[in-house]
Image (tube, helix red, strand yellow):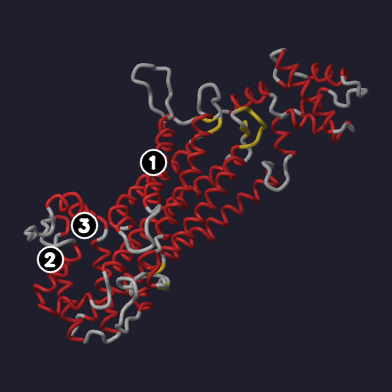
Amino acid sequence: MTDTTTFPDPTYRNTVLEPLFEGVKTHHAGDMAQINRAHLVMLGETEILNRDQTRAIGRALRDIEAETDIASLTYTGAYEDYFFLVEAELRRRLGDLGGMLHTARSRNDMDHTMFKLALMRRGLDLAEHLDDLIGAMILTAERERATLIVAYTHGQPAQPTTFGHYLAAAIEVAQRDATRLIGALNTVDLCPMGAAAITTSGFPIDRRRMADLLGFRVPLINSYGCIASVDYVTGLYSAIKLVFLHLGRVVQDFQFWSAFEVGQLHVPNSLVQISSIMPQKRNPVPIEHMRHLASVTCGRCDTVVNTMHNTPFTDMNDSEGEVQQAGYAAFQSGTRMLRLMAAFVPACSINADRVRANSDAACITITELADTLVRDGGLTFRQAHEIAAATARAVIDFGQPLSEGYAGFCAAFLGMGHGAVPLDEAAFRAAVSPANFVARRDREGGPAPAALDPALACARATLDKALRPSVAALRDRYAKAARDLDTTFAALLED
C-alpha cells in the first residue's frame, strides 16, 4: 500500500506544531537569532567557514531579522517549525550557502541553549523581585523591632515576641531560598552549544567561544548530558517552588492574624475591600491573592518537574517546547505575588490593644513567671512550672488578665507549701509583662534588641553584599555578552 499523505498531518499540525510555533514566536525568536549570530561568528573564527561565506550569511540573517514581522507570522505547515522557516529563507536568498549556517550544530543543542537563555532572563527577574521583597521585609522588621505580638504554636497563643523578630525569621528563610535560586541559576548558566545532536561534531568548533559569545559562564561539558540532563529545569523550578511554598506559610499567618477574633495585624484601607452587602466587613483580600498566587506558582513548578518523571535519559520532547513554555507562567504568577507582598508587608501595622488583650487573656507570659521563680525564688523548674500552671488556671477561671492575678499566684504558691511568697505584686507584674518577657530573651536569635539588631544587620549585609551582587553580576555578564556579540557580528558584515 502506498502512503500518499504528506507531512504534516492536519491534526498534528493543529494540535502540536502550530502551538509550538506560536510559543517560539512569543518566547524564543530573539534567543534563536542570538544563537544564529554567535554560531556564525564562531564558524568564521574557527575557519570552518571562510570570510566571504560568513559575511554573506550574516548579511542575510540581518536582513531577515529586519524584514520579518515575527508577531504577524502564522503557521502554515510549509515548514516544520520556526528554525526551518529561517533556514528556508536563508537558502532562498543564498542558495546552498544558506544551509551552511547549520554546520556542526543540531536543533538539540540549539533548543536547550534557547531554553536556558529564556530561563536565565526570567530567573534573574524573579530573583530581583525576591530581593526587593527581602529588602521590604528588612525595613519593616527594623521599624517593628520592638512591636509586641502574640506568637502562636499549634494554632494557640504561646509566647510574646516582636513583629520584627517574626519577620526576621521569615527573612532568614527567604534569603536561604534566594541563595538556592541563585544556585539553580548557576546550573542554568552552562552552555550546551557544540553538543550538536548528542556527541559533538567532527568539525573543529570552539565550545568555550560559543559560551562566551552567548554570556554563559562555561560550556556544559558532557555532550550527552547537554541534551539529556534536564536538571537545569528540575533544579530551577524546584528552587522556585520553595520560595513560594515558604512565603505562603507567612501569608497564611497574616490571614489568621487579621481575622476579627485575633485582630493583631491591621491591614490599611488601601489594601482592604468591602462587602457588597455587609457594610461592617473589612476584607483583606490581597492576603488571599498572595496565597493563591503562591499556590498557583507552586503548582506550575510541579507541572514542569513532574513532567520529567520517568522520562528516558536522552533527548525527548517532554523537556522541551511545550513544557518549557508552560513553565514560564510560573515566573509570571510568582512575580505578581512577590510584588504584592513587597507592598503589603510595609503597609501593615500591629494592633497593640488587641495584642495586649490577647496576651493577658491567654497567659502567654507565664513561662517567664516560672523562670523568675527559679532565678529569684530558688525553686526547681518543675516546682516553678506547677505554680505557674496553677496561677494560669486561677486567673482564667476568674476571667482575669494575668497582670491582675497576683492573688491567684499567691494562693497557688502557698498551696504548694514552698514557704513565703518570694515576689511582691510589683515584681509579679514585672515578671508577667510582655515587654519584660522579650527583654529577658537577649540570647543569640532572640527577640530582645541586643539579639535582634545584629541579626537584622546580618540580614541586610547578606542582601546588599551577597544576594543583590550575585544577581547583578549574572545580569551584567549576559548584557555585556549581548553587546559584544552585536559588535562582533557587525564587524563580520563589513567588507
Report the side of 375 relative to 83 (left or right). Answer: right
| Circle 1 residue | 296
What's the distance in space between the residues labelled 1 and 3, CA to CA? 25 Å
Q: Residues within 10 Å of mark 2 (few under 14, many from 20)?
A: few
Residue depicted at 86% across the width and 33% down the height: 380
In this rendering, does residue 270 appear at all? no
Depth check: give the residue in front, 310 or 410.
Answer: 310
Q: Earlier in the sequence, mark 3 or mark 2?
A: 3
| Camera-side mark, 2 or 1 | 1
Image location of residue 351, percent across then percent down: 56, 28
Report the side of 460 relative to 115 (left or right). Answer: right
Residue depicted at 47% across the width and 48% down the height: 243
344, above or below 109, in the image: above
Residue depicted at 80% across the width and 28% down the height: 385
Report the side of 381 relative to 47 (left or right). Answer: right
Residue depicted at 54% across the width and 25% down the height: 263
Q: Secondary structure at mark 1?
A: helix
| Camera-side mark, 3 or 2 | 3
Q: Earlier in the sequence, mark 1 or mark 3?
A: 3
Q: Secondary structure at mark 3?
A: helix
Amino acid type of the residue that numbered disc 3 sits on in the rendered structure: Lys
What's the distance in space between the residues labelled 3 and 2, CA to CA? 15 Å
* Residue 63, image quadrant: bottom left
In this rendering, does residue 303 appear at all? yes
Amino acid type of the residue that numbered disc 2 sits on in the rendered structure: Glu
| Circle 2 residue | 67
| Circle 3 residue | 25
The reply to whether discs 2 and 1 touch (Cβ–Cβ < 8 Å) is no
The reply to whether discs 3 and 2 touch (Cβ–Cβ < 8 Å) is no
Quarter of the image for the C terminus: give it: bottom left
Report the side of 379 relative to 390 (left or right). Answer: right
Amino acid type of the residue that numbered disc 1 sits on in the rendered structure: Val
